[in-house]
Image: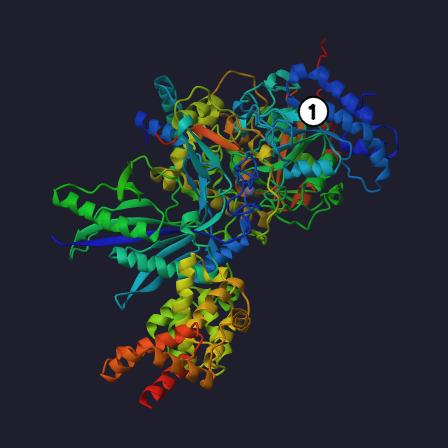
């Protein structure tokens, strides 16, 4: 049985009816990974032995527990910047090549309580810096729909793994669209919750104020299943928020009549891939037919958002990545004569080019001379943008954009990716700057068969509204049913 | 030319909390290296800080005692620099919105009051400890202290001499101890002081270039360092040189400071608000709560001791030097005399300032380390009043009591210290002494008053000091004049 | 506002990165290009705006002063490349 093709909610039904065992499921999935991983490259570290061991006992355990979690027994992947006790956690950097955390991230602790099965750690751009997962120190992840294309990033490993049926869901983080953009590139669902809704404790983050833990799943129902478990108040994270509006499964209803969906007029002037424009236009028609009202809104400070996000990300990274000094963990340069050399050699050898550049820029922006003109200004833009959104939400329930204005692009050796390719994230990073929730779901394909994603953003804590519109859209389309099955299994 | 010394102090105070500033590791002093660490205080990837409420409360308490404004809106900021004792390569501190601002502390110098402005008090975390293994040319790091909560108290440059600096520190230390904010043990590093010093020609308003002096481990070091640095700067200026803005390290053994490094153009801590910590608000309820639980401060207590007990200023100052001593005094007076009369107060004061201070000094301990209690002391005083023991015997009983904690009358009993107050018994002894010392009697009668003292002494000797001295005096007078 | 090699050196100093001459040139070029792209924010006048003091929405921003067990020393030290006698080790800081 090709059980790896299933979704989380389908598995849950089958397990409940005893039509499938977790043991079988895990074996199936591991076999699937084994046969596809060489082409895709979505994992950095496998955790198969433990997964198989865990699966041995889970069937009995789940049948005994009356209210087992919907994620019980579900094989999933965790992005490699989320700490896992005794499982190597590298953030795709040479710096942490041998780092084995002595603790679990809070979200991992929760997954373990749910009896989810962690199959391994997923590839990403080094410290989340990049948009194509070409910036991993270990490997490039390829797009399962077209192996010559990028999977997107930073969480390209997660998106590719879900798209290639290697895992049923991926837990990762999003600081500029790192879950949503690769999800769009790979034709799956990417979700970034409201800032503070999911604990960041144990997330190896570069940009704490922008980054949020979220998930990539095969469909919207699965997304709600995962969110239901990973959204909780965590006293170990000062930015964690107790939200009482949970019960996300209740929002999985087909019906958006009267819902007002705003489209920021600023984005229409921008250059989009024509195939994407066609998909979005068609999606708007679908939404209208489903009873939604499409209205024109404005985000006057939109054009400064990318720069603001980039500056803030650099500044926070420069400080957050300073702890990698060769002393307490991670890489340590050999043959050094003094402390200064230990620092400089370790960091020069441990970090990739992109990371170095952002650290340097961050230090520049925070220096006395640039603080006001860059860092403080970026913060002000962020506030102005928050205001823009506040005003927009007075007029509409949701805001719609393409997830990315461009399609998954060719794998390349281009190294200066920072600002140029952030073009692909200019719509997603808005949610990171302002802390609001956003989701990307499949909304069509390009002529050459690459997936296209549509993004919905809602006001803070309006996850429910997001899930409702995404679910309704999904129920009335079949893009999510198409899988990247063209993978040739070569032996 | 005459120069004026201008000093500002930066005082780091380790707060007396159970757990660290941002994590739940213990702050206990002296644990095995790196045994009080967790992912948070080791700066492990992914670990996040959460602020200790108690640390915030202690900072507010200090701010209130130092007449500061308490900020409603607070942020924690990062001070970025690399050093092995700093696990995250930034110190979490308060640069932009410190918790307390614009306060002052009055000190007394040569009987005159002087007000020293407090610029700010901010919360921050301590760094780890470095141990230098020079034989193997390496330095070792213990992060137990990393993340222990600190406050930094920054004064205005209002201090004009080493004596003023010490007076300020002394008063501040007393306040911090009264508030139970910190242990203030300089040798354990829970109180540390940096000195910013410049000099300027007398009368000039513009400040000179200042140096910053670190590694001052005692009040004496602060005093020496200020004198020394003022002199050094003067010498430099008088030789036509220029004082450099630099950090200097005080060497207590050599009694001199050494330049560590000059400030560079590139020196830049790149402060910014810590995105891992939300701004936190201090509401008026929290401040009111703390205000309502503030103890009486040393200065207030001092004044009250003078007005309420009629004590001399000097006594009041010494008795209020610690909260324990002041409480001990007050309780003793109350037990001794319900009306808390001036005489009773002075008697208690004399004992505390005399015998107690002598004993603690001899033994090198604090009041708390002794087994003395107010009721024991008052028991002893009552024995004296009743004439059961003499003043000099009482001193022996006192020493014994402080160390064993036994009731004074038990000690008197055991040691057979009971005073001889039986007139007939004493008269017999006095007569013996007179018979044995005819020379002294004639000397005395010839006007040599000293001879009388000798005879008293002889009587005391015969009774092994147990004779009631007043009675001996009286009987001896009677017998000689008979 | 174009950077000079001296600026790149300062940035390397702050970042504790060792840059040889060629790397400095590469970074200079890349970073100047990046800065050029960020020039857009100069269009927007924000000097008249003050950052609002965001009221935290978190009621539990502060925690109680309670001690919980720390990690074992082995756990604390296990990821370090060089340790001695239960401590982390670096080249001597006293010269
Ligand atoms: Zn700790």
Q: Position of residue A2 (x, y in %)?
A: 80, 21
Q: In which quarter of the image is residue B139?
A: top left
Q: Where is residue B84 in the image (x, y as percent from the top left)?
A: 44, 34
Q: Which residue occupies 78% across, 32% down?
A: A73
- Residue B69 visible in the shown view: no
Q: Which residue lies furthest to the bottom in this view?
A: B482
Q: Does the residue labelled 1 lie within 8 Å of ligand 1?
A: no
Q: Which residue occupies 30% across, 64% down?
A: B115
- Residue B6 visible in the shown view: yes
Q: Which of A466 and B471 lies nearest the eye of the viewer?
A: B471
Q: Which residue occupies 85% across, 33% down?
A: A60
Q: Which residue occupies 49% across, 65% down?
A: B400
Q: Mark 1 lies on which chain?
A: A
* Secondary structure at numbered mark 1: loop
Q: Is B355 placed left or right of A45 in the picture? A: left
Q: Is residue A112 above or below residue B112?
A: above
Q: Is A75 placed left or right of B22 in the picture? A: right
Point out the image quarter for the C terminus of chain A. Answer: top right
Q: Which of A453 and C7 lies nearest the eye of the viewer?
A: C7
- At label 1, counting other C-alpha atoms closer than 10 Å, the crowd grade (few under 14, some 14-19, many 20 or more) is some
Q: In this view, does B374 lie above or below C89?
A: below
Q: Which residue lies furthest to the top in this view?
A: A491
Q: Mark 1 sits on what residue?
A: A47
Q: Is residue A379 above or below residue C4?
A: below
User: How many dots with numbers?
Assistant: 1
* Quarter, ligand 1: top right
């Amino acid at each position: 049985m090709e059980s790896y093709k299933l979704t989380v909610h389908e598995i849950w039904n089958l397990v409940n009816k005893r039509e499938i065992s977790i043991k079988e499921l895990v074996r199936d999935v591991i076999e699937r990974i084994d046969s596809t991983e060489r082409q895709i490259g979505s994992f950095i570290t496998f955790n198969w032995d433990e997964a198989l061991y865990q699966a041995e006992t889970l069937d009995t355990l789940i049948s005994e527990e009356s209210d087992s979690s919907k994620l019980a027994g579900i094989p999933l992947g965790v992005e490699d910047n989320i700490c896992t006790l005794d499982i190597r956690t590298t953030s795709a950097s040479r710096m942490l090549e041998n780092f084995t955390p002595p603790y679990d991230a809070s979200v991992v602790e929760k997954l373990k309580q749910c009896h989810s099965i962690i199959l391994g750690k997923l590839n990403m751009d080094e410290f989340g810096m990049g948009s194509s997962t070409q910036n991993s120190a270990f490997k490039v992840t390829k797009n399962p729909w077209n192996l010559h294309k990028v999977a997107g990033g930073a969480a390209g490993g997660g998106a590719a793994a879900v798209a290639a049926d290697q895992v049923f869901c991926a837990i990762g983080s999003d600081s500029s669209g790192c879950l949503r953009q690769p999800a769009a590139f790979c034709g799956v669902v990417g979700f970034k919750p409201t800032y503070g809704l999911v604990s960041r404790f144990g997330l190896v983050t570069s940009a704490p104020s922008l980054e949020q833990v979220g998930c990539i799943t095969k469909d919207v129902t699965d997304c709600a299943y995962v969110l239901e478990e990973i959204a909780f108040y965590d006293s170990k994270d000062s930015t964690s928020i107790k939200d009482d509006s949970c019960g996300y499964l209740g929002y999985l209803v087909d019906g958006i009549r009267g819902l007002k969906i705003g489209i920021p007029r600023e984005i229409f002037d921008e250059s989009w891939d024509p195939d994407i424009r066609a998909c979005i236009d068609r999606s708007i028609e679908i939404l209208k037919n489903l009873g939604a009202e499409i209205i024109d809104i404005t985000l006057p400070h939109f054009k400064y958002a990318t720069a603001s996000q980039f500056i803030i990300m650099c500044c926070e990274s420069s400080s957050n990545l300073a702890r990698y000094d060769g002393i307490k963990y991670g890489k340590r340069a050999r043959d050094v004569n003094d402390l200064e050399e230990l620092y400089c050699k370790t960091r020069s050898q441990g970090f990739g080019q992109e990371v170095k550049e952002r650290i340097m820029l961050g230090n520049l922006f925070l220096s006395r001379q640039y603080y006001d003109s860059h860092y403080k200004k970026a913060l002000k833009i962020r506030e102005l943008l928050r205001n823009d959104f506040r005003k927009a939400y007075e007029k509409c329930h949701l805001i719609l954009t393409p997830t990315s204005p461009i399609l998954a692009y060719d794998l390349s050796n281009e190294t200066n990716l920072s600002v140029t390719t952030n073009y692909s994230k200019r719509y997603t990073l808005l949610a990171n700057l302002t802390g609001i929730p956003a989701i990307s779901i499949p909304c069509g394909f390009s002529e050459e068969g690459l997936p296209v994603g549509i993004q919905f953003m809602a006001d803070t804590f309006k996850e429910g509204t997001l899930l409702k519109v995404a679910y309704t859209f999904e129920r009335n389309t079949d893009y999510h049913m198409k899988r990247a099955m063209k993978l040739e299994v070569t032996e | 030319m005459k120069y004026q010394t201008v000093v500002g102090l930066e005082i780091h105070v380790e707060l007396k909390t159970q757990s660290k500033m941002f994590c739940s590791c213990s702050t206990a002093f002296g644990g095995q290296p790196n045994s009080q660490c967790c992912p948070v205080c080791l700066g492990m990837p992914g670990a996040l800080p959460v602020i200790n409420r108690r640390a915030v409360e202690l900072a507010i308490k200090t701010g209130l005692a130092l007449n500061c404004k308490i900020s409603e809106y607070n942020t924690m900021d990062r001070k970025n620099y690399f050093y092995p004792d700093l696990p995250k390569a930034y110190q979490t501190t308060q640069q932009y919105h410190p918790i307390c601002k614009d306060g002052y502390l009055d000190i007394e110098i040569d009987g005159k009051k002087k007000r020293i402005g407090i610029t700010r008090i901010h919360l921050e975390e301590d760094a780890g400890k470095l141990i230098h293994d020079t034989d193997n040319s390496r330095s070792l790091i213990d992060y137990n202290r990393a993340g222990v909560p600190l406050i930094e108290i920054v004064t205005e440059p209002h201090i004009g001499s080493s004596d003023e600096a010490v007076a300020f520190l002394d008063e501040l230390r007393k306040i911090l101890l009264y508030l139970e904010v910190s242990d203030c043990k300089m040798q354990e590093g829970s109180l540390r002081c940096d000195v910013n010093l410049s000099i300027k020609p007398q009368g000039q308003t513009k400040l000179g270039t200042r140096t910053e002096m670190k590694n001052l481990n005692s009040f004496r070091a602060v005093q020496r360092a200020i004198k020394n640095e003022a002199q050094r700067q003067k010498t430099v200026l008088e030789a036509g040189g220029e004082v450099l803005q630099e950090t200097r390290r005080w060497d207590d053994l050599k009694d001199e400071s050494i330049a560590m490094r000059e400030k560079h153009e590139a020196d830049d801590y790149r402060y910014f608000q810590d995105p891992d910590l939300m701004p936190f608000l201090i509401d008026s309820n929290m401040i009111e709560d703390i205000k309502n639980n503030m103890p009486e401060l040393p200065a207030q207590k001092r004044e009250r001791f003078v007005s309420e007990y009629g004590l001399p200023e000097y006594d009041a100052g010494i008795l209020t030097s610690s909260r324990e001593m002041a409480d001990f005094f007050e309780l003793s007076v109350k037990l001794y005399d319900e009306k808390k009369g001036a005489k009773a107060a002075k008697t208690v004061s004399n004992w505390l300032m005399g015998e107690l201070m002598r004993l603690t000094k001899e033994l090198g301990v604090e009041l708390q380390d002794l087994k003395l209690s107010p009721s024991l002391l008052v028991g002893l005083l009552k024995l004296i009043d009743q004439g059961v023991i003499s003043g000099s015997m009482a001193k022996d009983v006192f020493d014994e009591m402080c160390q064993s904690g036994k009731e004074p009358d038990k000690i008197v009993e055991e040691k057979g210290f009971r005073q001889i107050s039986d007139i007939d018994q004493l008269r017999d002894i006095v007569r013996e002494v007179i018979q044995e010392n005819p020379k002294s009697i004639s000397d005395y009668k010839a006007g040599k008053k000293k001879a009388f003292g000798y005879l008293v002494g002889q009587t005391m000797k015969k009774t092994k000091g147990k004779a009631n001295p007043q009675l001996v005096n009286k009987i001896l007078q009677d017998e000689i004049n008979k | 506002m174009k950077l000079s090699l001296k600026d790149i050196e300062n940035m390397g100093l702050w970042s504790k990165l060792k840059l040889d001459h060629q790397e400095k040139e590469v970074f200079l070029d890349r970073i100047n290009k990046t800065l050029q792209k960020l020039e857009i924010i100069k269009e927007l006048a924000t000097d008249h705006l003050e950052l609002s003091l965001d009221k935290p929405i978190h009621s539990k921003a502060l925690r109680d002063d309670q001690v919980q067990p720390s990690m074992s020393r082995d756990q604390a030290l296990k990821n370090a490349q060089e340790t001695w006698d239960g401590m982390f080790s670096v080249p001597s800081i006293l010269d």
